[in-house]
Amino acid sequence: MAAAQPGLPAGAAVVRRLARGCWSAFWDYETPKVIVVRNRRLGFVHRMVQLLILLYFVWYVFIVQKSYQDSETGPESSIITKVKGITISEHKVWDVEEYVKPPEGGSVVSIITRMEVTPSQTLGTCPESIRVHSSTCHSDDDCIAGQLDMQGNGIRTGHCVPYYHGDSKTCEVSAWCPVEDGTTENQFLGKMAPNFTILIKNNIHYPKFKFSKGNIASQKNLKHCTFDQDSDPYCPIFKLGFIVEQAGENFTELAHKGGVIGVIINWDCDLDLSESECNPKYSFRRLDPKYDPASSGYNFRFAKYYKINSTTTTRTLIKAYGIRIDVIVHGQAGKFSLIPTIINLATALTSIGVGSFLCDWILLTFMNKNKLYSHKKFDKVRTPSHYPQGQPPNPPSGRGPTLGELAELPLAVQPPRPCSISALTEQVVDTLDLHVGQRLPVPEPSQQDSTFTDPKGLAQL
């Protein structure tokens, strides 16, 4: 390196030399150096790593994941549901118009299985429900007129009145009277509910591949069939008892407390095959947390209004418990595409090089004579233009060049400099034949090349 210019501090000179070395090294060309190490243990590790990588890409990436395909997830979907069946309670026959909400049918449908009915409610004053916080009282002083409790049923009048039953007293409210739980009747509709049938119509479309299909076969007669995954998968008529059973639930318990059951339709389609191979797969599971008292179960309220003598408005309040069916559709379609195939093939071929990286690390770290391997693997060479006279030295006439003289030829080993590692040669290290004693005659090396040409050093590898 050139000496620092006069007047420059020593640190600046070092930085300048380093910068020059890095700039010069930037324009060097680097190429891998091949060393063949005939060591069966190392070779076994190398081939096993390559085999494992190859099996991973062939079996998992290409066969299981089908990474040679272009894919689309989340198909466009439409769902129509229709419930049929009748049931009875203690004093009434119920048809589908009364126990199905909403009646139009969609991806969510609720089937009422139990009711708590508060009949003949009219606007007036009556005792507040004892279930409401701070509704109990002993005198009118405990009730503040005009107070509104968002968890209650109405506005307090300021009076303390006897409750509907028992010796308790609660604050009087202006509301729909009697309030819920004052004169409630229970009606269980679940006696025949397991035999209710639910028709689920589903059509999907994958816009990327312009592929559409439905879960009802053309020319299918749906009047005399029920769903069977093996014998009749294109008759999507399910019994309510079958859905609850497939979800692993007890129907009687679910009918009393209510719950949410998911019907999951999965459309996984390999469009490289025929259309008949793309079939819906159904699964069922409970969606609400069964063992969490605060979140389990399903219920809602609604009222039916009517008039008496065309003047007095009356209503029947119903707290309904039921089984809510949520139909969920998802899926994925795939079709062969050249771009993902090329990308994954290139990734597989590149990953095979991990075996060489691992074996190089073992070779240079753990094996005997690893320093000698390191000297053989990393060399720095110069082109003829770097010699002071521009010409390599000629060997004496009458004999071949020695290894020391070969070191002075155009590809001469030089000490490395910062910022650059170059390699250009192929070395063969034979750890088997050298131990047998069959060695080729080697000319006497010069002193400066003894590190790289010592037969004993190579034999010890």
Image (spheres, rainbow, N blue to C red):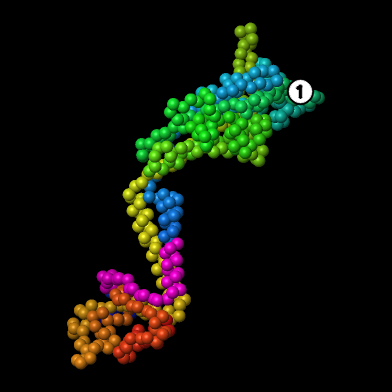
Q: Residue at x 36, y 50 (%)?
A: 340
Judge left or right: residue 87 versus residue 268: right
The answer to whether 81 is drawn above or below residue 376 in the figure is above
Of residues 299 and 146, the one drawn nearer to the viewer in this rendering = 299
Within the image, what quadrant is residue 110 found in?
Answer: top right
Q: Is residue 30 magenta?
A: yes
The answer to whether 388 is drawn above or below residue 16 in the figure is below
User: Magenta residues?
Assistant: 24-52
Number of numbered markers: 1
Horizontal and vertical percent for residue 67?
A: 40, 50
Q: Amino acid at mark 1?
A: Tyr
Of residues 414 and 24, the one drawn nearer to the viewer in this rendering = 414
Q: Residue at x 46, y 30 (%)?
A: 216
Judge left or right: residue 12 versus residue 182: left
Question: Can the viewer see residue 275 in this picture?
Answer: yes
Within the image, what quadrant is residue 47 found in?
Answer: bottom left
Question: Can the viewer see residue 73 in this picture?
Answer: no
Specify the quadrant that holds the N terminus. bottom left
Q: Residue at x 43, y 51 (%)?
A: 63
Q: Is residue 69 magenta?
A: no
Q: Secondary structure at mark 1?
A: loop
Horizontal and vertical percent for residue 452?
A: 35, 84
The answer to whether 107 is drawn above or below residue 183 in the figure is below
The answer to whether 314 is drawn above or below residue 213 in the figure is above
Q: Residue at x 46, y 27 (%)?
A: 220
Instruction: State the residue position of label 1.
Output: 163
Q: How crowded is the residue under tag 1: few (<14 C-alpha within 10 Å), some, or many (20+)? A: some
Horizontal and vertical percent for residue 406?
A: 26, 85
Specify the quadrant that holds the C terminus. bottom left
Q: For the view shown, which residue lies furthest in the top direction?
A: 309
